[in-house]
Image (cartoon, rainbow, N blue to C red):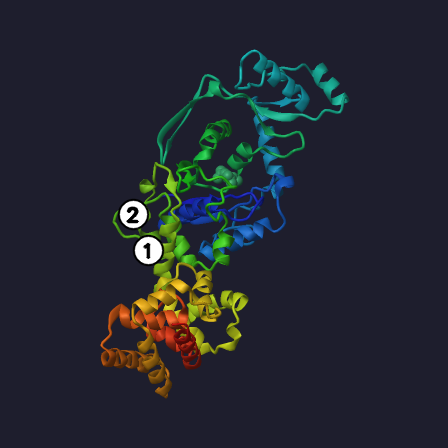
Amino acid sequence: MKEVRVRYAPSPTGHLHIGGARTALFNYLFAKHYNGKFIFRLEDTDLERNIPGGEASQLDNLEWLGIIPDESPLNPGPYGPYRQTERLDLYKEYANKLLDLGLAYECYCTPEELEEDRKKQEAEGNFSYRYDRKCLNISEEQKAVYIAEGRKPAIRFKVDETKDYEWNDIVRGHISVPGKDISDWVILKSNGIPTYNFAVVIDDALMKMTHVFRGEEHISNTPKQLMIYEALGLEAPQFGHMTLIVNEERKKLSKRDESIMQFISQYKDEGYLPEAMFNFFALLGWSPDSEDEIFSEEELIKIFDETRLSKSPSMFDKKKLHWIDNQYIQNEDLIKITEMCKPYLEKELPISSKDEEWLTKIIALFKPQLNYCSEIVELVAPFFAQYHLSNEDKDFINELEGKDLLEAISDNFNNLEVFDMENIKKCIKDTGKALNRKGKNLFMPIRLAVSNERHGGDLPTVLELYGKDQVITNIKKTIELL
Ligand code: GLU
């Protein structure tokens, strides 16, 4: 088999979007599964829409996800250059070839004339505009007039209306589009910039791409691309068009949809683990041949099977993402998670008053429930909150007859020389035994008195983290209120 070569070809018009990341990831998994190459190419010909740093941002975010191209503008292979703006001569060369073959023609129509034509066709009830081939057979005299007027020609491909354009889509199966449904289209604009459907063929062919996996919005482009392969006698890659990503309301994800964070950098900023994101994206439109959901990159490369790419829309399920990220956080080293959580805490809470040991202990307490690292702030915040027992909670403590328990435990805590989890645990147990309290009647008054919260982590650990002074102060404040 020929070496598998696939690519991810973003425009540097924005940062790495979740849709783009998924496209890149499936191409990457496919390449690595077949020991092939994954190429990053930049489609940067829409100069006005390019953003500064767009290329670097795409590459950096891919790298964060663990997707490192074998060839890219920064790491060129034998088929460069890897930015379309550096390949303009090549597009011109191939457009001229099509002119010479009589398969394309110069078109001198101005945008205004074309717009007028469109309106005319619409007035006649024809809403799928077709170029009327006005320039297909223009005379040399007419050409000279246009040139004298300062017009520059675009190059238009002459569509063979008698042909059907067909391919076996890896995801969708057989697709066929009649040539007569496609109007002659511009391959090279009058300013020498190629259109997407032309440039992509020249690039994919010269860069020896064997397969193309991309979003289903490109299905309608594929017939145009097939025409160019055929006209130039080039071998077309195999195409696979992946389904849409939809939100939880099953609506197509739009860039303005605020129900989902849309850019990879946002996940990075919120402290998601890249390995978890990689795992999550692999399951967004693809499923393994088992019920398992947690897979390392290596495992995914091994088991990836392009025939299992989904044919129905893939829902971006935030709960699933949280579950997967939580699994990775649970399995990750405590020191690493502590380091990841620290900047969020430093930014929002006065944790400089605490030492490293305290920090590590509190992260260990919450690590099992963290969905992503920035979430640590809301979990730790109660430890820095002002005393704030509500009337409701005060009544609840009374209902549980908590006053004498709190008095006893405050004395017993006071007598503890080492105020650590083990001693606290034993102290609570002994006090409970002495006063004949257990379960909720024992734990809830203490928890509420100290943290003013009904829920939280393991109580002895929570108390250790508050520290002896704070624990006793808060219990005393509570007793006064009862
Ligand atoms: N730049 C195109 C896009 O981002 C690439 C399309 C393709 O893969 O052919 O949609």
Residue for badge 2: 288
Q: Which mark is residue 65?
A: none
**At x 34% / y 80%, what residue is drawn?**
407
Q: Earlier in the sequence, mark 1 or mark 2?
A: 2
Q: Position of residue 190 (x, y in %)?
A: 66, 29
Q: Secondary structure at mark 2?
A: loop
Q: Position of residue 472 (x, y in %)?
A: 41, 80
Q: Quadrant of residue 192?
A: top right
Cα separation, mark 1 vs mark 2, equals 10 Å
Which residue is nearer to you in this view: 238 or 230? 238
Is residue 160 visible to us here? yes
Question: Is 446 above or below relative to 217?
Answer: below
Q: Secondary structure at mark 1?
A: loop
CB at disc 2 and ligand 1 closer than 8 Å: no
Which residue is nearer to you in this view: 131 or 1? 131
Dividing the image into 4 quarters, which one contains the N terminus? top left
Is residue 206 visible to us here? no
Q: Position of residue 214 (x, y in %)?
A: 44, 39
Looking at the image, residue 269 sits to the left or right of residue 293; the answer is right
Crowd band around label 1 with a 10 angstrom C-alpha radius: few (<14), some (14–19), many (20+) = some
**At x 43% / y 46%, what residue is drawn?**
22
Residue for badge 1: 295
Question: Is 32 above or below relative to 428?
Answer: above
**At x 57% / y 15%, what residue is drawn?**
122
Dividing the image into 4 quarters, which one contains the C terminus? bottom left
Residue type at mark 2?
Answer: Pro
